[in-house]
Image (tube, rainbow, N blue to C red):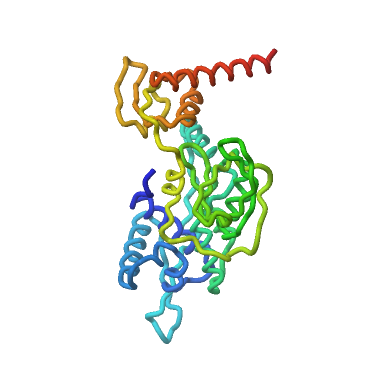
Amino acid sequence: MSAPSPSAEKTERLLNLILCLKSARRPVPKHKIRESLEDYRRAPSLEAFDRMFERDKDDLREMGIPITTTVLDVLFDDEVGYRIDSSEATLPEISFEPDEVAALALAARAWSGASIAGSAAAAVRKLRLSGVEIDDSVAAGVEPRVRTREPAFDAVHAAVLARQPITFDYRKGSGETGTRHVQPWALINWRGRWYLTAHDLDRGDLRAFRLGRFVGPVRKQGKAGTYAVPADHVPEVAVAAQEPEPAGTAVVRLRQGAGHGLRRRATAVREVGDEWTEVEVPYVPGTTEREVAALGAAAVAAAPAELVESVRRTLAAAAAAHAARVA
């Protein structure tokens, strides 16, 4: 998976800027805005930051989000502060048709549960520490939320935000369980699974841990804020680096509208009739079998022979387990 696109990065930056300026009770000076938002801090010079900030203000105003400018000191009219008035930036009452409500309900299912505030929360924290009075009710209302079935998600996410070292028991792919001591760096959803990237203190190296393999509770270890995440850390690269090398190419037939994860990684695509698409993907023993079997009747393994047999055994075992439960 590649790094976020420039447009995605800009969208996140604009959202973080909105959150900071809406949650501040008083106008925020430009230098504090730069200190608080990571994208602005990375600007190579003050001039580059000024250009970026001016473009972002123009973009928000074009969206109908008014940014007010206030002189902070009557004796120095060049010292101004910026703020978004919550009352002016609030949408009027909106009504939806039944099909629109259904679509929004589906979207909401993916945005409820554990917070992934990320850099936005860090920016608000920096503003509060620098003396800016924050309206927590506004900040909470803008915070995105995402649902996850992983029991460890909330504790790990909190540790990532707080830069809090943690320890946990972890089950490796072989089934062996051991205790890990890490400095959490980032959470990422990779191919449908949640991973923590972290500096492993015992091994002295960057590692990625699948949340589904955490065993038991996550425990805090040491004080929060005692380490810094490298500015060039890319979680996708860290997770991909730990995946086993492909053992050739797998051929899988997918029903129309199914198997989007496999389709995204396809190196070749062929339409087979009106219902099926045949894709070629890198074959990773163990992983590819699980992906194909999880699709049930929406996918058929065609090659290699070991993939076909492994998927057949997996589905047969699932059918037998289901029959035993209902018997």
Describe residue 140's horizontal placement relative to residue 246 as left or right: right
Q: Where in the figure is residue 47, as x and y percent of width and height?
A: 31, 72
Depth order, front residue of 105/284: 284
Describe residue 147's horizontal placement relative to residue 267 as left or right: right
Q: Where in the figure is residue 168, as x and y percent of width and height?
A: 64, 49
Q: Where in the figure is residue 270, as x and y percent of width and height?
A: 29, 22
| As drawn, 293 above or below 96 | above
Q: Residue furthest top?
A: 327
What residue sits 51% from the left and 25% below the top?
294
In which quadrant is the N terminus drawn?
A: top left
In which quadrant is the C terminus drawn?
A: top right
| As drawn, 164 above or below 216 | below
Depth order, front residue of 151/106: 151
What residue sits 48% from the left and 49% below the top?
92
Describe residue 70's horizontal placement relative to residue 269 as left or right: right
Q: Where in the figure is residue 252, as x and y percent of width and height?
A: 39, 22
What residue sits 32% from the left and 62% below the top?
55
Count up the numbered dots.
0
